[in-house]
Image (cartoon, rainbow, N blue to C red):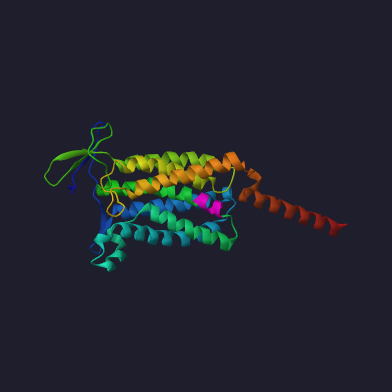
């Protein structure tokens, strides 16, 4: 357990002393963790709304996607965590509902959100790959911002290290121990991925390319970063880290699908949902113009 004392990065000359509690309302502590998560969510939604036209979507399409995928994704993230930490809930299953106490797993959220998007896209008659693409960008934003909530709580760090980016924490005995700041590694890794995929959106060859690229990029980073952490979920009684296993599968599936689509299928960008929609609208506009011209003759 770590004291609420300064966090130091000696090689960077940085020392900060954040209080996990932002403020108190009617005797109830409001934590920075929740505020930061909410900020990440807000930024992700703003990005989706502004970038929707690039994917051929409307703001209503984005709102429908968010209103369904987010709550179901949160529920799945909670269930995923509870399944692999069942010993914490076996004696009091009702505590599964105490989500404010923490315990969410990103992969559960991604799986639940992806399934929800599949259903929403079918109902709205929009290509699933298109909605997954813009959702992947939003998830990256949430991951970039959200990891700083772990920093405020002095959690989700890595093993003891003497690396250049080592982070000093004070334990209950008053001793300072230096750890890998894995929250920082993951935040920066996701920021690089977000910037790369942001510029790739207008150069996509097929719908779903951004989503598959996200799976591959995030999986690569998580395989490495998860190996440094000390609070990993394990596959029941085995020594296998669940997140590393799932991350490796993401790399294989995402990378394999990307290679297959780009090398074997050689997709035509004209088949992108945004381009098909623009072509339909142009054709409809031309037909309207011809009809109006005929009426004036």
Query: Which quarter shows the C terminus?
Result: bottom right
Report the side of 120 relative to 289 (left or right): left
The furthest residue to the left: 173
Please state the horizontal and vertical placement of residue 285, each as a whole percent of the image: 73, 54
Pick the residue in front: 121 or 33: 121
Report the side of 252 relative to 11 (left or right): right
Q: Main secondary structure of the magenta part?
A: helix
The furthest residue to the front: 238
Please state the horizontal and vertical placement of residue 27, each as a whole percent of the image: 22, 63
> Which residue is pictured at 37% across the width and 57% down the height?
77
Please state the horizontal and vertical placement of residue 135, each as a whole percent of the image: 48, 52
Q: How many marks overall? A: 0
The furthest residue to the right: 297
> Which residue is pictured at 28% across the width and 34% down the height?
165
Pick the residue in front: 33 or 255: 255
Query: Does 131 appear in magenta?
Result: yes
Please state the horizontal and vertical placement of residue 11, each as a whole percent of the image: 25, 31
Q: Tell me which segment is drawn in magenta.
A: 128-134
Query: Does 65 appear in magenta?
Result: no
Report the side of 18 relative to 64 (left or right): left
Q: Is residue 203 visible?
A: no
Pick the residue in front: 15 or 188: 188
Work out whether 15 lies above or below 93.
Answer: above
Q: Is residue 219 visible?
A: yes
């Amino acid at each position: 357990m770590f004291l609420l004392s300064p966090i130091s990065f000696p090689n960077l000359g940085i020392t900060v002393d954040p209080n996990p509690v932002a403020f108190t309302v009617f005797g109830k502590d409001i934590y920075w963790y929740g505020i930061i998560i909410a900020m990440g969510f807000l930024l992700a939604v703003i990005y989706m709304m502004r970038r929707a036209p690039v994917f051929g979507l409307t703001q209503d399409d984005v709102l429908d996607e968010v209103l369904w995928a987010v709550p179901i994704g949160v529920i799945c993230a909670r269930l995923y965590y509870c399944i692999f930490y069942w010993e914490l809930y076996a004696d009091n299953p009702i505590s599964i509902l105490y989500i404010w106490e923490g315990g969410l797993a990103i992969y559960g959220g991604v799986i639940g959100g992806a399934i929800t998007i599949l259903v929403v896209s079918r109902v709205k008659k929009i290509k699933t790959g298109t909605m997954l693409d813009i959702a992947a960008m939003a998830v990256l934003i949430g991951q970039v911002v959200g990891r700083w909530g772990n920093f405020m709580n002095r959690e989700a760090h890595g093993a003891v290290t003497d690396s250049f980016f080592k982070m000093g924490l004070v334990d209950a005995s008053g001793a300072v121990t230096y750890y890998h700041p894995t929250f920082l590694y993951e935040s920066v890794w996701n920021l690089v991925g977000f910037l790369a995929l942001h510029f790739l959106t207008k150069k996509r060859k097929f719908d779903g390319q951004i989503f598959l690229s996200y799976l591959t990029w995030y999986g690569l980073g998580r395989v490495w970063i998860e190996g440094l952490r000390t609070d990993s979920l394990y596959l029941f009684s085995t020594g296998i880290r669940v997140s590393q296993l799932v991350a490796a599968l993401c790399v294989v599936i995402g990378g394999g699908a990307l290679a297959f689509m780009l090398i074997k299928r050689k997709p035509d960008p004209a088949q992108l949902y945004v381009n098909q929609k623009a072509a339909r609208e142009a054709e409809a506009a031309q037909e309207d113009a011809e009809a109006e011209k005929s009426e004036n003759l």
